[in-house]
Image: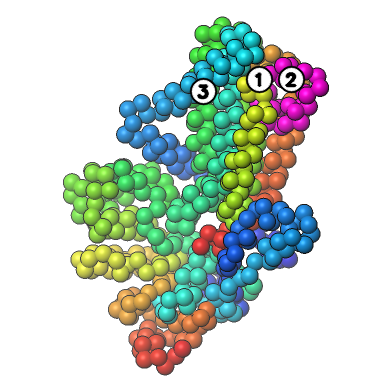
């Protein structure tokens, strides 16, 4: 029992230590991002290009299929895709986060959770670039921003905390379970179709609306999207998103605390 | 700290690694099936067999000791070092390490081949917790030790193997903590490096209070350590003066 108790302390120190060395996580994330675009002509602009391609493609095809007015629809898709990309990339990659950071974990005297923060920060940088693209799209489309739109920033923070919780759990499970990444990847494909990113909840009709309502990802996207597109309409989403985030964080910390002890042995 | 207590205290410690045979123990689907069926399906994944790399180890290392671990491959040297570094946790027994540990296990971590020697030091300084104010001194020290000349401002992927080791060794040993743990890397590089590395190693080992190293080299053991420990199959079989322990190890008197 004494040993178990001590291990929880080790894990918590590790988690808090990651935040106290936040500057290192930022430098690592920044150098990851630079390395990714090194020796490419466009550099980080590639993030912008691929984002525009996806949004444009969906807008043209599904805008026509659903008979949506282009102006409103492109804003809706651009924002939804940004959040979806962030959440799904972190979730799908997180089982490999610790394995990817093994060299630094075993060499430097730094908290291991720093490797998780580092990878999430990379995705946050990309999310910010996507949000920049969204702002340009929104301005061109003539979106009327109200003061309530500031709530979107809070919504983004909630999404980031949600992703951190999931990443903590999945990264520590992923060290042992090699099929976790595959399992998550296949669920993500399914989830993409079932999440209102490129279709709207109202188009489902009353009978099938529960497909969206029971999906926490929908609510996470909605707390960022609604304050801008339909201010003051996302009360339920805030409740569900905040509860899901609390659950994700608690689950992540518990899994990390219980797995921390055996991580190195599985990584040999 | 209690003056009588060692810096590193290891009592009846066993260290284990999970044995991976079937591959099923690494499947989350199998684990989920076992949980859902209360162990009736794939129940074996719940209890992964463990291999004991180190058994009932007792070891006390006092302040100021320079310890060399010797023994055949698989005798548990690296495992003990990993436990001292705080990566592995004992399955049973008690272990205390009183002080900060610097571990030299691999050298290449955190360096980007596309960046210059100078650029890489900026990130490594952060990883090594070197203060911004010391950055200049850090660069100068590495530059002088490695004698890289103009290569210092070229991407490190252009370095020869020997240059790279010199460079990384210099960066990693700029500042060391109270306890230094080394897993035989000093034997690498050309003979010129070895003489230089030895001088630097002696210098940094003096800075660190306690030093524990795994080695296969009699020369390194005798010159750098004042205590040798011979491990065999995860147990201590000999402990004493380096020259004598090595003689008994080499002649097979102990094992």
SS type, badge 1 = loop
Query: Quick check: do tags 2 and 1 share a chain?
Result: yes
Instruction: Look at mark 2 in the image and give the residue it sits on.
Output: A204
Sooner in the amino-acid sequence: mark 1 or mark 3: 3
Q: Is residue A236 visible?
A: no
Give the left or right position of residue B219, taking residue A232 as reference: left
Residue at horizontal 71 percent and vertical 27 percent from the top: A219
Q: Are circles 3 and 2 on residues that touch, CB within 8 Å?
A: no
Query: Quick check: do tags 3 and 2 share a chain?
Result: yes
Mark 2: give few (<14), some (14-19) or many (20+) Cα within 10 Å. Answer: some
SS type, badge 3 = helix
**Mark-to-mark CA distance, 1 and 3:** 14 Å
Q: Which residues are magenta?
A: A199-222
- Judged by its main secondary structure, the magenta piece is helix
SS type, badge 2 = helix
- Quarter of the image where one finds residue A34: top left
Q: Position of residue B20 (x, y in %)?
A: 57, 65
Instruction: Look at mark 1 in the image and give the residue it sits on.
Output: A199
Give the left or right position of residue A42, taking residue A139 as reference: left
Q: Is residue A38 visible?
A: yes
């Amino acid at each position: 029992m004494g040993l178990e108790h001590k291990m929880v302390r080790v894990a918590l120190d590790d988690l808090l230590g990651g935040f106290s060395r936040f500057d290192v996580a930022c430098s690592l994330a920044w150098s990851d991002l630079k390395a990714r675009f090194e020796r490419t002509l466009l550099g980080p602009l590639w993030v912008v290009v691929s984002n525009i391609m996806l949004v444009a493609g969906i807008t043209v095809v599904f805008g026509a299929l659903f008979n949506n007015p282009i102006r409103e629809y492109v804003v809706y898709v651009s924002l939804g895709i940004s959040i979806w990309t962030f959440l799904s990339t972190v979730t799908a990659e997180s089982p490999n986060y610790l394995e990817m950071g093994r060299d630094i974990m075993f060499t430097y005297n730094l908290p291991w959770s720093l490797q998780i923060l580092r990878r999430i920060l990379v995705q946050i940088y990309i999310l910010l670039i996507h949000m920049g693209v969204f702002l340009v799209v929104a301005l061109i489309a003539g979106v009327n921003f109200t003061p309530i739109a500031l709530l979107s920033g809070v919504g983004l923070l909630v999404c980031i905390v949600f992703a951190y919780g999931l990443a903590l759990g999945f990264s520590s499970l992923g060290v042992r379970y090699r099929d976790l990444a595959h399992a998550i990847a296949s669920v993500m494909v399914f989830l993409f179709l079932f999440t209102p990113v490129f279709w709207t909840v109202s188009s489902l009709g009353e009978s099938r609306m529960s497909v969206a309502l029971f999906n926490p990802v929908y609510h996470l996207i909605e707390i960022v999207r609604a304050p801008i597109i339909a201010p003051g309409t996302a009360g339920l989403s805030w409740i569900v998103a905040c509860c899901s985030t609390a659950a994700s964080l608690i689950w992540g910390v518990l899994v990390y605390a219980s797995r921390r002890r055996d991580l190195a042995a599985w990584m040999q | 700290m209690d003056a009588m207590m060692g810096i590193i205290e290891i009592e009846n410690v066993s260290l284990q690694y999970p044995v991976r045979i079937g591959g099923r123990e690494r499947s989350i689907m199998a684990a989920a099936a076992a949980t859902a069926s209360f162990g009736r399906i794939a129940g074996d994944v719940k209890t992964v067999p463990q291999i004991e790399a180190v058994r009932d180890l007792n070891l006390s290392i006092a302040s100021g000791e320079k310890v060399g671990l010797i023994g055949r491959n698989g005798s548990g040297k690296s495992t003990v070092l990993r436990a001292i570094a705080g990566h592995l946790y004992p399955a049973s027994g008690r272990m205390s390490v009183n002080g900060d540990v610097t571990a030299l296990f691999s050298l290449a971590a955190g360096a980007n081949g596309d960046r210059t020697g100078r650029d890489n030091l900026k990130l490594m300084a952060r990883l090594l917790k070197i203060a911004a104010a010391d950055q200049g001194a850090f660069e100068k020290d590495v530059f002088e030790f490695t004698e890289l000349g103009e290569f210092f401002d070229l991407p490190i992927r252009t370095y020869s193997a020997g240059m790279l080791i010199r460079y990384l060794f210099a960066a990693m040993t700029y500042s060391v903590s109270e306890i230094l743990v080394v897993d035989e890397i000093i034997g690498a590089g050309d003979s010129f490096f070895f003489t230089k590395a030895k001088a630097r190693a002696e210098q940094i080992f003096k800075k660190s209070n306690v030093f524990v190293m795994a080695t296969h080299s009699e020369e390194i053991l005798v010159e750098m350590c004042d205590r040798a420990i011979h491990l065999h199959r995860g147990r201590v079989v000999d402990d004493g003066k380096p020259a004598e322990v090595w003689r008994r190890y080499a002649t097979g008197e102990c094992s």
